[in-house]
């Protein structure tokens, strides 16, 4: 049976018959029961194939070299076109996503504040839109003297989804994207956005769920200022209630 070894056409022969065929032995099977032999009459043919393949590679390199020499003077222009095309691609992608989410441009303010009307979680909205399910919107206002909002309610009530929605919408808006909310909404600009949502325990760093929360809180306190958005989901959980309760009261 014909096969390929070392880029050469060979015959697979039972190892007990390999001495019956004149040629070059290239390999044996893993079991040692089959030898791969290049018969003498095929050697010259394989050599010709090898030479033709090398000629093909040299011709490819010659064409690429000539093409590179021709295009090299236009390198600066092509780089400018690449930047321009990338910008168009980003704008088009933002526009298509905004169309799918029925997104709007809210009113912008320089002060860090929220005035979200009919806001929706972007990923949840797209998912529900595909299956024809309604996404319940939310209103959230946080400005002036009010700097803290505490969300409470039963399990599976949508608290974490709302918090994630706030973070996603803020990041989208500050990235130059339209957001799924009513156009009468107002959004401010935050210089820092911190989030502690989910389980961040790490065996590599020797951190439990609660100790990882404390590490995050330390980072927040060290770097947060008056223009920082901080999102914390169930702070004080994953520990003894007696220790968690005072922390909840403090924050």
Image (tube, helix red, strand yellow):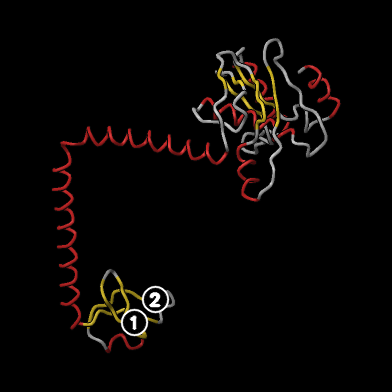
Q: Position of residue 156 (x, y in %)?
A: 78, 39
Q: CA distance from mark 1 to mark 2?
A: 9 Å
Q: Which label belongs to residue 225?
A: none
Q: Residue furthest right?
A: 242
Tell whether 43 sits left or right of 189. Answer: left
Name the residue rendered at 33%, 88% in the picture.
Answer: 17
Name the foreground residue: 1 vs 237: 237
CB-based contact (under 8 Å), mark 1 and mark 2: yes
Name which quarter of the figure residue 219 lies in: top right
Q: Position of residue 118 (x, y in %)?
A: 67, 30
Q: Secondary structure at mark 2?
A: loop
Name which quarter of the figure residue 158 lies in: top right
Mark 1 and mark 2 lie on one chain; the one further toward the N terminus is: 1
Q: Position of residue 106 (x, y in %)?
A: 57, 24
Name the residue rendered at 53%, 36% in the picture.
Answer: 98
Instruction: Sort mark 2 into few (<14), some (14-19) or many (20+) by Cα contacts within 10 Å.
Output: few
Name the residue rendered at 67%, 14% in the picture.
Answer: 143
Tell whether 246 sits left or right of 29. Answer: right
* Mark 1 or 2, closer to the camera: 1
Quadrant assignment for the C terminus: top right
Q: Is residue 162 above or below residue 148?
A: below
Q: Secondary structure at mark 1?
A: strand
Q: Position of residue 39 (x, y in %)?
A: 23, 82
Name the residue rendered at 81%, 18% in the picture.
Answer: 249
The residue at which mark 2 appears reads as: 29
Q: Which label belongs to residue 12?
A: 1
Tell whether 243 sits left or right of 188. Answer: right
Quadrant assignment for the N terminus: bottom left
């Amino acid at each position: 049976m014909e096969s390929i070894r070392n880029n050469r056409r060979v015959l697979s022969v039972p190892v007990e018959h390999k001495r019956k065929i004149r040629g070059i032995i290239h390999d044996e099977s893993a079991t040692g029961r089959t030898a791969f032999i290049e018969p003498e009459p095929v050697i010259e043919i394989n050599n010709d194939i090898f030479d033709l393949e090398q000629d093909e590679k040299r011709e490819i390199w010659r064409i690429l070299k000539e093409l590179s020499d021709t295009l090299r003077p236009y390198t600066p222009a092509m780089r400018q076109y690449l930047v321009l095309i990338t910008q168009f691609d980003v704008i088009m992608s933002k526009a298509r996503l905004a169309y799918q989410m029925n997104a709007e441009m809210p009113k912008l303010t320089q002060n860090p504040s929220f005035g979200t009307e009919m806001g929706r979680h972007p990923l949840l909205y797209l998912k529900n839109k595909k299956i024809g399910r309604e996404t319940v919107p939310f209103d959230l206002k946080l400005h002036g003297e009010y700097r803290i909002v505490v969300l409470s309610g039963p399990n599976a009530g949508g608290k974490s989804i709302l918090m994630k929605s706030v973070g996603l919408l803020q990041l989208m808006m500050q990235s130059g994207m339209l957001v799924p909310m009513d156009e009468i909404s107002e959004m401010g600009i935050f210089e820092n956005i911190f989030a502690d949502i989910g389980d961040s325990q790490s065996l590599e760093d020797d951190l439990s769920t609660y100790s990882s929360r404390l590490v995050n809180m330390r980072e927040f306190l060290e770097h947060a200022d008056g223009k920082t958005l901080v999102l914390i989901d169930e702070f004080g959980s994953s520990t003894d209630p007696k220790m968690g309760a005072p922390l909840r009261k403090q924050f």
